[in-house]
Image: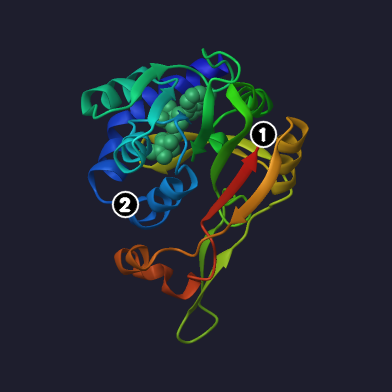
Amino acid sequence: MVADRRRDLWDQNSQWWTQKYVNRDDPDYEELLLPLITDLFLNQKSVLDIGGGEGRVSRSLVIENTCDVTCADFSFSQISAAKNLGRGPTFVQAAADNLPFRTGSFDGALACLVFEHLENFEQAVDEASRILIPNGRFVLVLNHPVTQTSNSGFVYDHTHDPPEKYWRISEYLTETSQYEEVEKGIFIPFEHRTISRYINTLVESGFIIERFYEPAPSHEFISKNPEYENVRAIPRLLIIICKK
Ligand SMILES: C[S@@+](CC[C@H](N)C(=O)[O-])C[C@H]1O[C@@H](n2cnc3c(N)ncnc32)[C@H](O)[C@@H]1O
């Protein structure tokens, strides 16, 4: 039932997601994520994009790396939007915790800004491991669990003249599950987990952690969002690179 509510929300939010993050050039994708993901999957023949949404990352991988990319997402609306945009990947409606692919069928897999939205995280990690070949690469991109914990954000301190601005870090050690209203009427399911939970789950599923990245916000992001200028040393993303 809960999984259905989550899928319904992504179905309802599909147009919003496309307008907000796909139609406008989102600097995090254009400057950071797409070039990094392209590099990480160079020379791989087949890649699964888990929770691939309307297929932006998948399309970029097909174009830049000319590999076979399958984009899987549990939302009918997201996959329909992806199919309409087309341009190379194979699109499949599928849940991350129950992937309809044979064991060892992909060289690489990625989940870009997906696992912090799903509840059956352990099963999803097991599934990512199962569908990979031995030594296959898994790339997990997350909203940074330390700095993007819900209730984190700007605080304006008016005891100073001029007022000072801080980035408040909310209760990092408390794991939470909630539907967050990110804009009026737009609810997104968010699961806050600690970094140790992510790492330990990956390790328990048999992954070897190869690298971490915590990129600073891109220059273009800061120029489009000048309020972030004085918190540019606070990472918004965490990227974990693993090998099966
Ligand atoms: C924030 S969007 C990211 C989309 C895409 N990865 C990207 O970076 O452009 C999250 C996506 O995860 C999908 N998703 C959430 N939970 C999922 C699940 N349990 N199984 C498969 N897809 C899921 C949503 O439908 C949505 O398209």
At 29% from the left and 39% from the top, the residue drawn is 63
Asked if labels 1 and 2 touch by Cβ distance under 8 angstroms, the answer is no
Q: In terms of depth relative to the viewer, which is nearer, 237 or 45?
A: 45
Q: In terms of depth relative to the viewer, which is nearer, 38 or 80?
A: 38
Q: Is residue 239 above or below residue 178?
A: below
Looking at the image, residue 44 sits to the left or right of residue 172; the answer is left
Q: CA distance from mark 2 to mark 1?
A: 31 Å
Q: Quadrant of residue 169?
A: bottom right
Q: Earlier in the sequence, mark 2 or mark 1?
A: 2
Q: Residue 226's spot in the image, x, y percent?
A: 35, 70
Q: Is mark 2 within 8 Å of ligand 1?
A: no
At 43% from the left and 23% from the top, the residue drawn is 72
Q: Is residue 190 visible?
A: no
User: Mark number for residue 244?
Assistant: 1
Q: What colour-coding does the image apply?
A: rainbow
Q: Nearer the viewer, mark 2 or mark 1?
A: 1
Q: How many marks?
A: 2
Q: In terms of depth relative to the viewer, which is nearer, 10 or 133?
A: 133
Looking at the image, residue 208 sits to the left or right of residue 98; the answer is right
User: What is the three-letter code of the residue carrying label 1?
Assistant: Lys
Q: Residue furthest bottom?
A: 161
At 37% from the left and 50% from the top, the residue drawn is 29
At 29% from the left and 20% from the top, the residue drawn is 80
User: Mark number for residue 26?
Assistant: 2
Quadrant of the image containing the N terminus: top right
Is label 1 in a helix, a strand or a loop? loop
Is label 2 in a helix, a strand or a loop? loop
Q: Residue 198's spot in the image, x, y percent?
A: 69, 41
User: What is the three-letter code of the residue carrying label 2?
Assistant: Asp
Q: Is residue 213 above or below residue 191?
A: below
